[in-house]
Image (cartoon, rainbow, N blue to C red):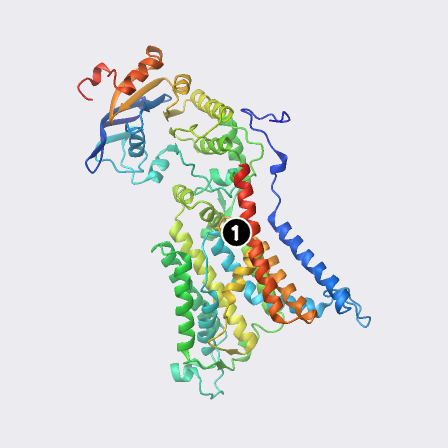
């Protein structure tokens, strides 16, 4: 025991145990990955990944590429914000990709213009009134589909005590089935002009970043956030402390479902069409963003900021491989390794923390 | 108001055919510190579980703070003012000290936001520091998460929680069973601080030295029954052991066991 403390009973403050925010490590990883790509780019293709090396433009960064990097992760990033909260409660949501598919089909049906007379048409399902509706209607429908899926997930997990993996796996299959059944597998296209504006241009990025800021505040400064961390950290303690754990879990899954529903609206608006296969593997990419961003699958630890940086890491890697003119298969191999590496690192940190406690 | 904080009459708990607790009559006065001793399976923990509402008693009455009570669960007991430090600590490892102290009863702002109401971190931090001063608990950095603390510090946080909320009765179930010598000393210091402040306490312990150091009165359980009610001054370690092992039985309890 050192003697530089005024504590009694031999309890001293060991400065080496001071906490280092995990987000800084994740941010360091992002910088490291960028440097690797810059070096490889300079050697193999003679270009810079993020910086402007073209004399015709007067800017420091290659803005076009930065824009691509963030746009391609924005929509899945919105899902990842919800998935992060679910994982912090020590749960998992495998259904978000399929919920995107179902919400995309159903919402798009309420967004179609009347002048369209293609075969897959909500006219056949609802009649003429379902066409040319104000933009609020399809947005509301998309959110409602996400709400319903999240509510069922939450009730199954919280009240039926079905493991989250199984409950959301069931929802994953069910929602994908709904997406295919809705228009018998046919795509639904041609939304109204106002609907098409929701996901146009940089809108997905603006929505993603606004939601990230909103949920960062919610997770860190509100009772909802504190209880989410407490449940993931020690559910027994949360119960003993008087937190209504089942009700809170339902709320967390509902928020995750609604964010998936919102992602579906933005995605269909951006693509101007909805297909039953939309959102395939999005749940896995969203989980990957969270895990790379330092969210622990054991619950209790992680943050929205971490997940946003995790999303950027995936974006940089995806763009970087294209920039190096390497095939997409290399990209997937590297992403797979990074995800396993991130979880291994989390395990190692857990064990080290347990060993010194 | 009477000077009794807790009284049980004929408190009984049967688990099927097992008579874990039989007709326990127990009285605790305001500010009194009482130890419950006994061999494993003597009914100590069963007795505590009936008082704190963790289990529902088979029969008997519990009078707490002048009113007969029927706690549906540990939360009801806590609401009424009985704080329990359990053997297994009910702390969230990834939260810091104030977060744990106020878990489930946070101080908040903007309450109209419902579940998204804001936490009043400053008020909770101030109250935490007051609670730590009151109990004499020294924790170097209250912003540290529980995961980064030693077993002794964790136990101290759990005990500080009882003091922060001005409870009427504190129950500790073997609070030092898993602690080292120095950590045990700190927990015992806190118990003495609580005594000075007139806090009522029930201490379940196997540690004879600790019991004689800390409490006013010793209750001995044997095979589900109370067999002795001893003032600390009138007894010694060997005497208590005799009651625990069954070599002796208190005069007023003759015929019971």
Instruction: Classify the position of the N terminus of chain B by image quarter.
Output: top left
**Within 10 Å of the Cα at label 1, are there few (<14), some (14-19), or many (20+) other Cα atoms?**
many
Mark 1 belongs to chain: A
Is B184 on the left-hand or right-hand side of A67?
left
Q: Position of residue A352 (x, y in %)?
A: 56, 42
Q: Position of residue A238 (x, y in %)?
A: 42, 44
Residue that mark 1 sits on:
A296
Is B10 on the left-hand or right-hand side of B195?
left
Q: Nearer the viewer, residue A42 or A34?
A: A42
Q: Quick one: which residue is furthest to the right in this view? A: A55
- SS for callout 1: loop
Is A223 on the left-hand or right-hand side of B236?
right
**Which residue is found at the position 77% from the left and 64% from the top?**
A60
Taking B71 as reference, is A196 above or below it?
A: below
Instruction: Classify the position of the C terminus of chain B by image quarter.
Output: top left
**Which residue is found at the position 78% from the left and 68% from the top?**
A46
Taking A32 as reference, is B157 above or below it?
A: above
Q: Position of residue B230 (x, y in %)?
A: 30, 16
Residue A148 in view of the camera? no
Taking A217 as reference, is B202 above or below it?
A: above
Quarter of the rendering containing residue A334: bottom right
């Amino acid at each position: 025991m050192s003697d530089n403390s005024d504590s009694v009973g031999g309890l001293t403050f060991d400065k080496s145990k001071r906490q280092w925010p995990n987000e800084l490590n994740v941010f360091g990883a992002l910088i490291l990955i960028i440097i690797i790509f810059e070096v490889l780019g300079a050697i193999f293709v003679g270009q810079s990944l993020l910086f402007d090396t073209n004399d015709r433009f007067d800017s420091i960064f290659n803005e076009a590429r930065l824009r691509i990097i963030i746009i391609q992760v924005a929509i899945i990033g919105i899902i990842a914000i919800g998935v992060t909260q679910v994982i912090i409660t020590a749960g998992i949501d495998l259904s978000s990709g399929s919920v995107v598919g179902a919400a995309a089909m159903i919402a798009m049906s309420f967004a179609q213009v009347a002048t369209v007379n293609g075969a897959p048409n909500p006219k056949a399902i609802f009649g003429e009134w379902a066409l040319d509706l104000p933009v609020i209607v399809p947005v509301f429908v998309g959110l409602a589909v996400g709400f319903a899926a999240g509510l069922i997930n939450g009730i199954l997990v919280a009240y039926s005590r079905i493991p989250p993996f199984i409950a959301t796996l069931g929802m994953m299959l069910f929602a994908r089935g709904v997406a295919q059944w809705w228009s018998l597998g046919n795509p639904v296209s041609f939304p109204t002009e106002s609907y098409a504006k929701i996901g146009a241009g940089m809108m997905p990025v603006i929505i993603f970043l606004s939601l990230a800021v909103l949920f960062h505040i919610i997770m860190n400064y509100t009772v909802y956030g504190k209880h989410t961390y407490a449940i993931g950290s020690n559910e027994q303690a949360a119960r003993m402390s008087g937190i209504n754990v089942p009700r809170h879990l339902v709320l967390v899954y509902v928020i995750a479902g609604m964010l998936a529903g919102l992602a579906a609206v933005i995605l269909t608006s951006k693509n101007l069409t909805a297909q039953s296969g939309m959102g395939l593997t999005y749940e896995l990419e969203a989980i990957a963003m969270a895990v790379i961003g330092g969210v622990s699958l054991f619950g209790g630890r992680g943050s929205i900021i971490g997940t946003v940086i995790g999303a950027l890491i995936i974006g940089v890697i995806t763009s970087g491989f294209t920039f190096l003119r390497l095939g997409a298969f290399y990209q997937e191999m590297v992403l797979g390794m990074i995800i396993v590496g991130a979880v291994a690192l989390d395990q190692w940190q857990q064990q080290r923390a347990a060993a010194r406690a | 108001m009477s000077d009794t904080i807790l009284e049980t009459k004929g408190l009984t708990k049967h688990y099927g055919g097992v008579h874990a607790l039989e007709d326990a009559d127990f009285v605790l006065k305001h500010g009194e510190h009482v130890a419950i001793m006994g061999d494993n399976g003597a009914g100590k923990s069963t007795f505590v579980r009936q008082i704190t509402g963790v289990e529902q008693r088979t029969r008997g009455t519990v009078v707490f703070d002048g009113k007969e009570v029927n706690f549906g669960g540990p939360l009801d007991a806590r609401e009424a003012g009985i704080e329990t430090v359990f053997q297994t600590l009910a702390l969230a490892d990834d939260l810091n000290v104030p977060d744990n102290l106020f878990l489930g009863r946070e101080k908040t702002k903007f309450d109209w936001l419902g579940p998204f109401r804001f936490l009043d971190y400053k008020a909770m931090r101030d109250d935490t520091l007051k609670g730590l001063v009151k109990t004499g608990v020294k924790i170097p950095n209250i912003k540290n998460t529980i995961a980064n603390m030693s077993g002794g510090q964790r136990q101290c946080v759990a005990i500080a929680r009882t003091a922060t909320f001005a409870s009427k009765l504190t129950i500790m179930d073997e609070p030092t069973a898993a602690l080292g010598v120095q950590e045990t000393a700190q927990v015992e210091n806190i118990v003495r601080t609580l005594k000075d402040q007139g806090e009522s306490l029930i201490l379940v312990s196997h540690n004879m030295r600790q019991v004689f150091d800390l409490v006013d009165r010793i209750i001995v359980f044997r095979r589900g029954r109370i067999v002795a009610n001893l003032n600390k001054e009138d007894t010694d370690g060997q005497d208590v052991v005799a009651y625990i092992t069954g070599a002796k039985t208190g005069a007023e309890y003759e015929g019971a066991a």
